[in-house]
Image (tube, grey):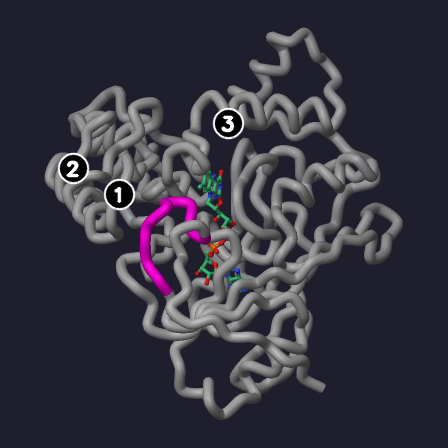
Amino acid sequence: MSASFSVSHQFPLQSLNTFGIAASAQAYVRVTEREQLLGVYADANWAAVPKLVLGGGSNVLLTGDFNGLVLHIALQGRALAGETKQHYLVRAAAGENWHAFVQWTLAQGYGGLENLSLIPGTAGAAPIQNIGAYGLEIKDVFHSVTVFDPRSGETRAMDAAACRFAYRDSVFKQEGRHLIILDVTFALPKQWQPNLRYAELAQALAEQGIAAPTPQQVADTVIAIRRRKLPDPAVIGNAGSFFKNPVVTGAQCAALLAQFPTLVHHAQPDGSEKLAAGWLIDQCGWKGRNLGAAGVYPKQALVLVNNGGATGADVVALARAIQADVQARYGVLLEPEPVFI
Ligand SMILES: Cc1cc2nc3c(=O)[nH]c(=O)nc-3n(C[C@H](O)[C@H](O)[C@H](O)COP(=O)(O)OP(=O)(O)OC[C@H]3O[C@@H](n4cnc5c(N)ncnc54)[C@H](O)[C@@H]3O)c2cc1C
């Protein structure tokens, strides 16, 4: 059975992307029930129209108007979906606000997501790039997703192996780009231990004199650190980290270190090395610099910002200039993290 859906035309998207870029969608549907999605895909009038699934718009760069149909995922609901001997299985509908969901899990007494506090966006988008921060990635606490496959018209569950999570990547950014996530389930440990792998987090807790933190204390500390370091999109438009940290071979890293001894790098379990993109950008003199209405955040070189009235083209021009400088100096190509639309 398909529920009716209501289409708006020439719909403004400025408040639906955290960069705050002014653009419009030819058509727009706010999806509050699964059946509405099925209805859109079953409707011959919309079959050939390009579609864009949008959550909180915190990981997209709108490079112009979208000549198609935006499906704004606003499915709501969160619940304890079950439990195993070791885990609580906690589920969020795709349109749930991520941070509000994390806070809710903590209030219910389920620790495990606290290191990912204050990441903007929706629960449904969290698996897309395997969101990560402060020593935790979604894949570490992931159980399954329910997806709608528009090609087959089927709804099915996918486990972690099927999602093929990697650093800021998953099957949903590769050959599963057409899949629409309807809900996400996390396996949160009954025997919770704080994850203090990230040195800055451990230090911030120690400075407060907290030796054995609760999940909420970890969350509060992560929130405080993030508020200090990152611009609030409600005040300055941005999409968080604009570039992924590039991964190079051990040999490439050694060669770079010989030339640039202060290079910031982190050894990976497979012998490769992750370089700090922010450091590379900073060294090229971009921190705090502007190009048109787009700029590099003065406190964090990895974040590109809209200083007011920037177009998608302004941000792209800035990103390209940074990429060119980093490539010329270090021979490393920075890959953007947000999805260009
Ligand atoms: C200030 C700031 C800080 C940030 N910090 C972090 C961080 O620490 N770590 C991190 O990993 N990310 C971070 N981000 C990036 C961003 O918050 C995450 O990637 C978030 O998961 C995006 O969610 P969203 O709902 O806004 O997705 P959107 O921007 O709406 O969409 C992103 C992509 O996912 C697709 N998509 C969205 N919903 C669905 C769905 N239900 N089904 C299928 N596809 C879908 C879209 O089509 C698009 O391709 C930050 C962003 C900002 C602005």
The type of residue carrying mark 2 is Leu
Q: Which residue is mark 3?
A: 226
Most extreme residue toward the right, as rendered?
A: 85
Disc 1 marks which residue?
A: 309
Q: Residue 215: percent from the left, percent from the top? A: 73, 29
Marks 1/2: CA distance?
12 Å
Left or right, 80 with reference to 314:
right
- Disc 1/disc 3 C-alpha distance (Å): 25 Å
Q: Residue furthest bottom?
A: 44
State the image quarter where residue 245 is shown. top left
Mark 3 crowd level (few <14, some 14–19, many ≥20, 10 Å Cα) = some
Q: Is residue 20 magenta?
A: yes
Query: Which quarter of the figure has residue 119?
Result: top right
Q: Which mark is residue 291?
A: 2
Foreground pick, 244 / 1: 1
Asked if the residue at label 3 sits under 8 Å from ligand 1, the reply is: yes
On whether residue 57 falls in the magenta region, the answer is no
Magenta span covers which residues? 16-24
Q: Residue 148, relative to residue 234: is it above or below?
A: below
Mark before the other along the chain sequence, 1 or 2: 2
